[in-house]
Amino acid sequence: MLAERMDKHKVDCWLINTGWTGGRYGTGKRCPLAVTRRIVDAVHSGELKTAQYETVETFGLQIPTAVQGTRVPCKLLNPALTWRDRATFKCECVMEISRRRQLAPCCPACHSHGYGHS
């Protein structure tokens, strides 16, 4: 229903990571507030409407490849780039999707990272 209304009224929607990056809670670190502010500024100014984007495989979300200015490191725009172990990142994503959909994870690599199917 929300997506239908957004399409009908031509509304842009921005998902901004204001939480952890580089690992799950306890191993990663907070996304710096200055970075979050710069991204919000880019949304408000319309700058992100003209940015180049890439698609995050696991979630199918489009993310900007860069934000003008030096206060936003490109790797912070793509969460996978901040994790040391990208396979663990992918498993964490699959597990989060599974939790939200209340389904068993579908990633065969999950077993090798200690995630059992429920």
Image: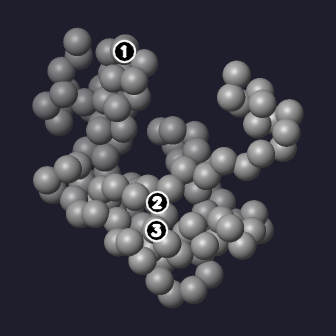
Answer above or below: position of 1 versus 74. above
N-term mark: 2 or 3: 3
Going by the numbered disc 2, the residue's amino acid type is Asn
Are discs 1 and 2 less than 8 Å apart at CB? no
Measured from the top left, where is residue 76 in percent x and y? 42, 67
Label located before the other in sequence (1 or 3): 3
Q: Is residue 98 above or below residue 58?
A: above
**Residue lying at 25% horizontally and 30% vertically, measured from the top left:** 110
**What residue lies at 48% left-to-right and 77% top-to-bottom?**
72
Looking at the rendered image, the disc whose residue lies closer to the viewer, 2 or 3, is 3
Q: Is residue 83 visible?
A: no
Report which residue position mark 3 lands on: 36
Q: Image check: 89 left or right of 116?
A: right
Q: CA distance from mark 1 to mark 3?
A: 30 Å
Residue at the location (20% across, 50% down)? 25
Q: Which residue is mark 2?
A: 78
Earlier along the polypeptide chain: callout 1 or callout 2?
2
Q: Secondary structure at mark 3?
A: helix
In whole angstroms, how far apart are the C-alphas of marks 1 and 2?
26 Å
Residue placed furthest toward the bottom? 70
Q: Which mark is residue 102?
A: 1
Residue 97's x, y, as percent?
40, 28
Q: Residue at x 23, y 63 (%)?
A: 29
Q: Quadrant of residue 19?
A: bottom left
The one of 88 and 33 positioned closer to us in this rendering? 33
How far, Cα to Cα, is label 2 from label 3? Answer: 13 Å
Q: Is disc 2 placed on a helix, strand or loop?
A: loop
Neighbours of disc 1 within 10 Å: few (<14), some (14-19), many (20+): few
- Image coordinates for residue 90, horizontal then vertical, percent: 35, 41
Helix, strand or loop status at disc 1: loop
Amino acid type at mark 1: Gln
